[in-house]
Image: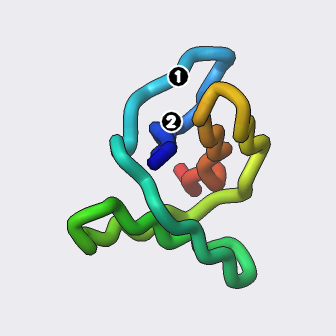
Amino acid sequence: MCLSDAYEVTGGERRPLMSYVSGISVENNTITLTDMLGARKIISGSLKSVDLTHNIILIEPLEKAE
């Protein structure tokens, strides 16, 4: 079983979001990650890339209003 690690990409740097991701759901600017145990994490942003060979998911967060 190949599971992926999800990262938030900001300013060219990666910050871990979730390990062992087994599912991704995208609706508008909302991404829901689900891990192999069923835990969910909801992120506001856009899917930048999914590398199925290296099991890496990159998510670009929405800009926060100041």
Q: Position of residue 31 (x, y in %)?
A: 58, 69
- Up the image or down, 19 lies above or below 14; here it is below
Name the residue rendered at 71%, 40% in the picture: 52
Give whichever of 27, 22 is nearer the camera: 22
Q: In x, y percent, where is residue 8?
A: 53, 37
Quarter of the rendering containing residue 56:
top right
Q: In the figure, 21 relative to 16: above or below?
A: below
Asked which quadrant contains residue 15, the reply is top left
Residue on which the image places disc 2: 7
Residue depicted at 43% across the width and 53% down the height: 21
Judged from the image, the secondary structure of the residue bearing numbered disc 1 is strand
| Vertical order, 51 against 15 (above or below) | below
> What numbered label is drawn on residue 34?
none
- Residue at horizontal 59%, vertical 35%? 55
Q: Nearer the viewer, residue 54 or 9?
A: 54
Q: Which residue is mark 1?
A: 14
Q: SS at mark 2? A: strand
In the rendered view, does 46 fall on the left or right side of 55? right
Residue type, mark 2 in image: Tyr
